[in-house]
Image (tube, rainbow, N blue to C red):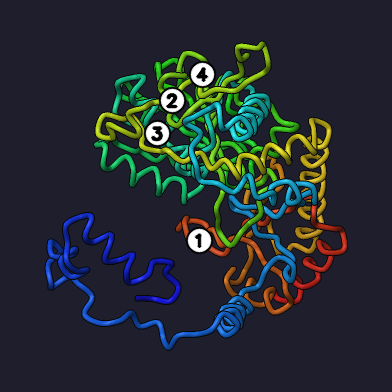
């Protein structure tokens, strides 16, 4: 027996007796000997709680957080300011549960939190309906592609190469096992190549996926893409960053059929890579094609406000092979975080954050390109990220910046062969003029 397990030797014997087994060895007799662990795990000697805490802290200190670093790195995850009230509310123990609210009569708090989240995401995206939250932006995008294929009965997805590279990788993985073809549309000057899109779109195209603003930070003109897509009876899926929607046209206004994205920017920290939260919003006519679940508002027998699971595909849980989606988690803690953030900021607050991001990014663009040592990679309108070309390797630049506790930009050459020595820099509302000026000074010295 292990001292950290609550069961005693007598408990073990009683449980084995109940299931008709005489020993632990007999319990595992169906597992072949060749795949069983022959000895203890290589975890080192046992430690006391004090020793273990010190041991873990030693390794944790090797990480650097944004309490120590100034971040100019974006590329899908952003260092936005999180009001203190967000952490204060989500720290309440009653919100810490992985339970899916199947029984509404005992889950009113969880259901209300999800309902409020859904309402705010619907308002932000300009769409008609939103489901309970999903894993992250990449899987939300994939679920949207599956929805499009189910709805159109077509088997080809066109995705612009200006969509986040990680999202495209996840999309390809999922579609491969569904025998759905994924065709990437090249970019030209940092935006989707319209002529290539026209060449590739056809009668078997289920959807066109574009990012807004795109991975390079550019605000693409989606009007022509929307027209081309719908003329071919395909669906338009927009992968959006939620903060710019405070001042840009919403996917609903653009004419998108499905809007997806990652809600990390809505009060969720960077968390060393997760967990994050995906959102998926669409039109009323596609509501029964949506994965996950939808929380609705109603009245109980006494006429009081109440919340219920209005719609969920039960096949996700009991007939998985027949389900259009097997996403069952609703990431409700992250959804609650997003809801608190949006309620705290309000419409004016989101607009203010968006304005500050774009104003600081354009100031940074101006000062960083003044000397000519760093040149703009593109000449298109951008929101809070832009791409610069340098004469030296970006990894070397970032190494030098890190020595000064600055997290530099994303090296685009990692994902795009044609963009050598180019870096994608992000500027959120947290970045100050002093920090941007310091970045300029250091970059000038490095080159």
User: Which residue is depicted at the point 52% across and 57% down?
Assistant: 419
* Residue 227: numbered disc: 4
Select label 3 or label 2 by which is in front: 2
The span from disc 3 to disc 2 (Cα, nearest Å) is: 28 Å
Q: Does dot 4 land on a helix, a strand or a loop? A: helix
The span from disc 3 to disc 4 (Cα, nearest Å) is: 15 Å
Select label 2 or label 1 by which is in front: 2
Instruction: Tell whether 38 sits left or right of 239.
Output: left
Residue denoted by label 2 = 312
- The percent coordinates of residue 374 (x first, y second) are 70, 62
Pointer 3 or 1: first along the chain? 3
- Taking depth in this image into account, of 276 and 228 the one nearest to the observer is 276
Pointer 2 or 1: first along the chain? 2
The span from disc 4 to disc 2 (Cα, nearest Å) is: 32 Å
Mark 4 near mark 1, Cβ–Cβ under 8 Å?
no
For label 2, the crowd category at 10 Å Cα-Cα, with few meaning under 14, some 14 to 19 and many 20 or more, is: some
- Taking depth in this image into account, of 304 and 227 the one nearest to the observer is 304
For label 1, the crowd category at 10 Å Cα-Cα, with few meaning under 14, some 14 to 19 and many 20 or more, is: some
User: Which residue is depicted at the point 60% across and 76% down?
Assistant: 60
The span from disc 4 to disc 1 (Cα, nearest Å) is: 32 Å
User: Which residue is depicted at the point 37% across and 70% down?
Assistant: 8
Residue denoted by label 3 = 158
Q: Quadrant of the C terminus?
A: bottom right
Pointer 4 or 1: first along the chain? 4
Pointer 4 or 2: first along the chain? 4
- The percent coordinates of residue 437 (x first, y second) are 84, 64
* Residue 413: numbered disc: 1
Q: In this view, does 363 lie above or below 320?
A: below
Q: Does dot 1 land on a helix, a strand or a loop? A: helix
The span from disc 3 to disc 1 (Cα, nearest Å) is: 23 Å
């Amino acid at each position: 027996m292990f001292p950290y397990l609550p069961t005693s030797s007598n408990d073990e014997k009683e449980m084995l007796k109940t299931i008709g087994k005489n020993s632990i060895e007999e319990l595992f007799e169906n597992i072949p000997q060749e795949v069983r662990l022959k000895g203890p795990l290589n975890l080192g000697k046992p430690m006391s709680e004090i020793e273990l805490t010190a041991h873990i802290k030693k390794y944790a200190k090797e990480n650097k957080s944004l309490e120590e670093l100034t971040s100019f790195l974006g590329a899908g995850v952003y260092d936005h300011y999180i009001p203190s009230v967000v952490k204060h509310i989500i720290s309440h123990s009653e919100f810490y549960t992985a339970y899916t609210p199947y029984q509404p009569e005992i889950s009113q708090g969880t259901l209300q939190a999800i309902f409020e989240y859904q309402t705010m995401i619907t308002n932000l995206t300009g769409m008609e309906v939103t489901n309970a939250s999903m894993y992250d932006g990449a899987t939300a995008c994939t679920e949207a592609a599956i929805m499009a294929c189910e709805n159109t009965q077509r088997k080809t997805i066109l995705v612009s190469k200006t969509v986040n590279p990680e999202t495209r990788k996840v999309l390809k993985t999922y579609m491969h096992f569904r025998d759905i073809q994924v065709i990437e549309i090249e970019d030209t000057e940092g935006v989707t190549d319209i002529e290539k899109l026209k060449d590739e779109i056809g009668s078997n195209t289920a959807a066109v996926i574009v990012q807004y603003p795109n991975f390079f930070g550019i605000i693409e003109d989606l009007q022509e893409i929307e027209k081309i897509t719908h003329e071919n009876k395909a669906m338009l899926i927009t992968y959006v960053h939620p903060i710019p929607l405070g001042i840009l046209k919403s996917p609903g206004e653009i004419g998108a059929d499905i809007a997806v994205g990652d809600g990390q920017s809505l009060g969720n920290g960077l968390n060393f890579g997760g967990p994050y939260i995906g959102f998926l919003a669409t039109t009323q006519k596609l509501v029964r094609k949506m994965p996950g679940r939808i929380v609705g508002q109603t009245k109980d027998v006494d006429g009081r406000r109440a919340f219920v699971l209005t719609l969920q595909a039960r096949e996700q849980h009991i007939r998985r092979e027949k389900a259009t989606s097997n996403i069952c988690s609703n990431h409700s803690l992250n959804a609650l975080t997003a809801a608190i953030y949006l309620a705290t900021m309000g419409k004016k607050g989101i607009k203010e954050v968006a304005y500050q991001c774009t104003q600081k990014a354009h100031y940074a663009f101006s000062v960083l390109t003044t000397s000519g040592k760093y040149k703009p990679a593109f000449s298109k309108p951008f929101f809070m990220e832009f791409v610069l070309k340098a004469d030296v390797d970006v990894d070397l630049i970032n190494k030098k910046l890190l020595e000064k506790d600055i997290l530099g930009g994303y090296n685009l050459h990692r994902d795009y062969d044609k963009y050598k020595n180019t870096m994608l820099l992000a500027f959120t509302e947290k970045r100050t003029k002093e920090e941007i000026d310091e970045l300029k000074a250091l970059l000038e010295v490095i080159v």
